[in-house]
Amino acid sequence: MNRQKRVACIHDISGIGKCSLTAAIPIISAAGIEAAAMPTAVLSTHTGNITGFTYRDLTADLEPFANHWKSLGITFDGIYSGFLGSTEQVDIVCNFIDEFKTDNTVVIVDPAMADGGRMYTTFDDDFAKEMILLCKKADIIVPNLTEAAFLLGEKYIEPPYTEEYIEGIVKRLLRLGPSKVVLTGVSFRDDEIGCAVCEKNGEVFCRFSEKYDGTYYGTGDIFASALTGAFLNGKTIYESAEIALSFTCSAIKRTYGAGTDTRLGVNFEQGLCDYINNLGG
């Protein structure tokens, strides 16, 4: 029997909202992979359009976490980072990658820092410069179009986009250092949403699904987690992106149909069986 793979998931954890670790752990586990959690902060809910949430910063715990894992001889097949609350945390994750990455370790970075044309309120342009250093260490980066603009130092452009524009963005992101880019939030028409995928020296492929009205919090984390699980199951980056897109969009459709409060996350749980089947498991 093959050895079970293990991924270090470095994200915050929100009790309500189905994002970050509360998305990464079940999705990566469903892919048959051990999800080793390194929480960067603990919140009562995510921060998108919700007020009064509690927040406990865990920056001081990250290096002791890593040191303990190192003392136990823990190794990782993947290192997957998401929302990081400060430049100090970015530096710690960069050091973690230097310490734990081997020739067989895949590093996936979701540079979660912006959306809708704006940086998250807790960040500034200097944070984007720090995030570039982390992206340089990644094998795969999964930015949305706002994050891509900040990483590249370019002005954000509202959708819909042209194929030429998206191809240019992806190619410029590859020059930052990763060997693979999966760009989310891509749209050539008002009724579609999807992603663009490319490997270094390869072609850019775009995949789309139906777009639903509303803002669906946590879907970037769900997409990146599903992508991570698929890629570490031996799927190509193109296959992994298609599987992640299908899984995420089905969760949005399920939530839209139920008419539930989208601030509380999307119903991805009832799609996990389909996700597993798409992985061939």
Image (tube, rainbow, N blue to C red):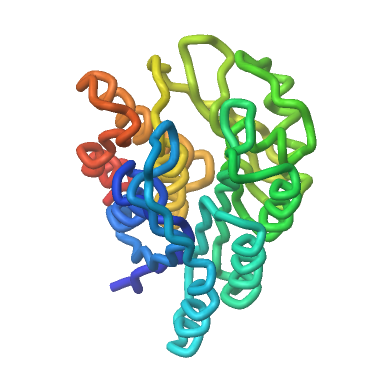
Task: Locate residue 1 relative to residue 66 in the image: left or right.
Answer: left
The quarter of the displayed image where residue 251 is located: top left
User: Which residue is rendered at x = 54% and y = 77% of the image?
Assistant: 63
Q: Residue at x 37, y 34 (%)?
A: 248
Q: Image check: 122 left or right of 176?
A: left
Q: With respect to residue 59, does 133 lie above or below?
A: above
Q: Position of residue 242 (x, y in %)?
A: 44, 35
On screen, residue 156 above or below 125: above
Please say if 280 is above or below 152. Answer: below
Above or below residue 198? Residue 13 is: below
Q: Residue furthest top?
A: 190
Answer left or right for 182 relative to 17.
Answer: right
Nearest to the observer: residue 124 or residue 173 = 124
Q: Looking at the image, can residue 89 be seen?
A: yes
Q: Is residue 94 left or right of residue 32?
A: right
The x, y position of residue 184, in whole percent, is 55, 32
Outermost residue toward the front in this view: 52
| Residue at (30% x, 33% y) in the render | 266
Residue 176 in percent (x, y) is at 76, 48
